[in-house]
Image (tube, rainbow, N blue to C red):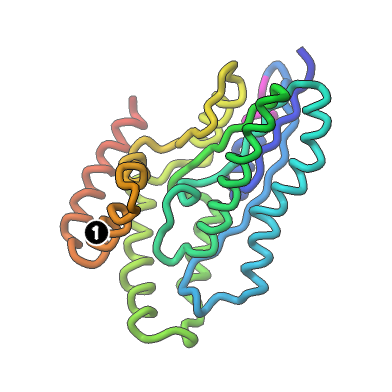
Amino acid sequence: MGTRKVLVTGCSSGIGLALAVRLAKDKLRRFKVNNAGVGMIGPLECQNVSAMQELFNTNFFGLVRLVKELLPDMKQRQSGHIVVMSSVLGIQGLLFNDVYAASKFAVEGFCESLAVQAMKFNVKMTLVEPGPVVTEFEKKVYEEAEKMDLSETDEETARIFRQIYLKYSHKVFNSVGQTPEEVAEQSLQVIVSKNPPFRHQTNRLYMPLTAMKHADPTGCLPIDAFYKMIFQHDRMFNASLSILRILHRRMGAA
């Protein structure tokens, strides 16, 4: 069996690095990998439009350019598997992740549309969708957010971002965050699968949150649930995170 070219794009450096190392260590030397990604959090009023464009240029148009170059050869050979590092934020938006989630929604729409054509040429596509992942990249994003200039937004929004969102984010990452190596291992299993799924969420503990979107065609259920968790039921939210933290540790030990 010859070397397989695997395209993994739109991911943070931590996941990309872990996946590249995992594939590089493959004893049969079956793979060649490519990846990139940029993050952004904070109130929309405080975001620079040029920075938003740069994010889309990497997370979305970077993927488009690479697929545009590789797809013709795959179609000609009637063979290939494009693995895209997406995110659960490509399924469900999240407070103060407006622009980043939008880039992942674009990735998901692009791949879902292209997958139909690709199937005709026996080319497979898979979206790997991690939830929170503890990486140096994520730590840097949140460190920068702590020092973010919020003078362009109102006091209440600034308070919600600093005192509620950042605090809750740290708790979520500590409770259910995966390591890059965990995501990389699951990505490898998708790559070597004979019948890979179109979508693969890496964090089972996060699935109930994304499932809400499909449970209600009006779209109100997930928005209402997130609103209540963040602004009305602080104790319940913290209790739920404690339970998830215990489940996550048990799953890791299993």
Give above or below for 89 relative to 119: below
Residue range corresponding to the magenta coloring? 22-26
Q: Residue at x 21, y 49 (%)?
A: 240
Looking at this view, is 115 or 171 the one in front? 115
User: Image check: 63 left or right of 147?
Assistant: right
Tally the marks. 1
Residue 225, given in percent of the width and then of the height, sits at: 26, 56
User: Circle 1 is placed at which residue position?
Assistant: 229
Q: Residue at x 75, y 30 (%)?
A: 32
Residue 164, given in percent of the width and then of the height, sits at: 31, 69
The image quarter in which residue 211 lies = top left
Q: Residues within 10 Å of mark 1 (few under 14, many from 20)?
A: some
Looking at this view, is 156 or 176 the one in front? 156
Q: As drawn, which residue projects farthest toward the front?
A: 218
Give above or below for 115 relative to 245: above
Does the magenta run of residues contain 24?
Answer: yes
User: Image check: 207 left or right of 9?
Assistant: left
Q: Residue at x 32, y 58 (%)?
A: 223
Q: Residue at x 61, y 25 (%)?
A: 191
